[in-house]
Image (spheres, rainbow, N blue to C red):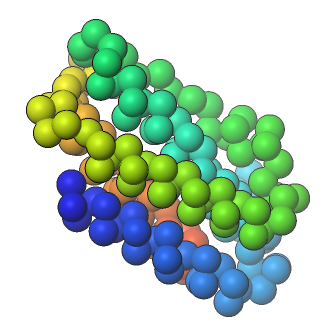
Amino acid sequence: MENVINGINHWIRFLPGEFNQMTKKEITNRPLPHKWSKKEILGHLCDSAINNIDRFIKIQYEDQPYVIQSYKQEHWVLLQNYQDRPLDEILNLFCALNKQIINIILNIPKGRLSNLCDLGNNQQKTLEWLIKDYLEHMEHHINNQILIKNNA
Ligand code: NI
């Protein structure tokens, strides 16, 4: 879990500076009308943190396998209107939520990392897998959508 904690910590420290070097246009540009802007992707990462906090806690005390509820990502981004929210507020939210996730991970008793959840389609995964997947999902969006230049 140490690698995951280091990875999350890296983005808490690094991502605000990256955003602050971008122009407002680059941050709010939607590459296509139905595609998220970089700001909305940051909002989506906050939504991922919110939903995963719930999962990381409940999988520790609910009956196993704990059934994971999916959430409608597009609705979450639009209903919270990240596009029109001040960037620094979303960045603060991202950092606070991820500090909370680090705190949760640090407090998981070792034996509970093997607790099982059910992702649907007969797929069962451990809490450890879920935590690693959380960081992979975050890095996928950061590396492929936030840190790449688009011609805004
Ligand atoms: Ni995603």
Where residue 20 appears, as percent x and y from the top left, is 69, 84
Residue 86, quarter of the rendered image:
bottom right
| Rendering coords of residue 66 (x, y %) | 32, 17
Q: Is residue 50 visible?
A: yes
Closer to the camera in the image, 122 or 55? 55
Task: Using the rendered view, name the quadrant where residue 151 is placed.
Answer: bottom right
Using the rendered image of the protein, determine whether residue 151 is visible from the camera's viewpoint: no
Q: If the image is split into quadrants, where does the N terminus sit? A: bottom left
Residue at the (77%, 86%) spot, across then down: 23
Q: Residue at x 12, y 32 (%)?
A: 111
In the image: residue 37, left or right of residue 86: left
* Quarter occupied by residue 78: top right
Relative to 89, say whether 78 is above or below: above
Residue under the image location 53 percent in, 45 percent down: 48
Locate residue 32, reporting x and y percent. 73, 61
Quarter containing the C terminus: bottom right
| Count of labels in the image | 0
Q: Which residue extends farthest bottom?
A: 21
Relative to 6, residue 63 above or below: above
Residue at image position (19%, 37%) is 109
Q: Nearer the viewer, residue 121 or 51?
A: 51
Above or below: residue 77 compared with residue 147 = above
Residue nearest the viewer, comparing 8 with 150: 8
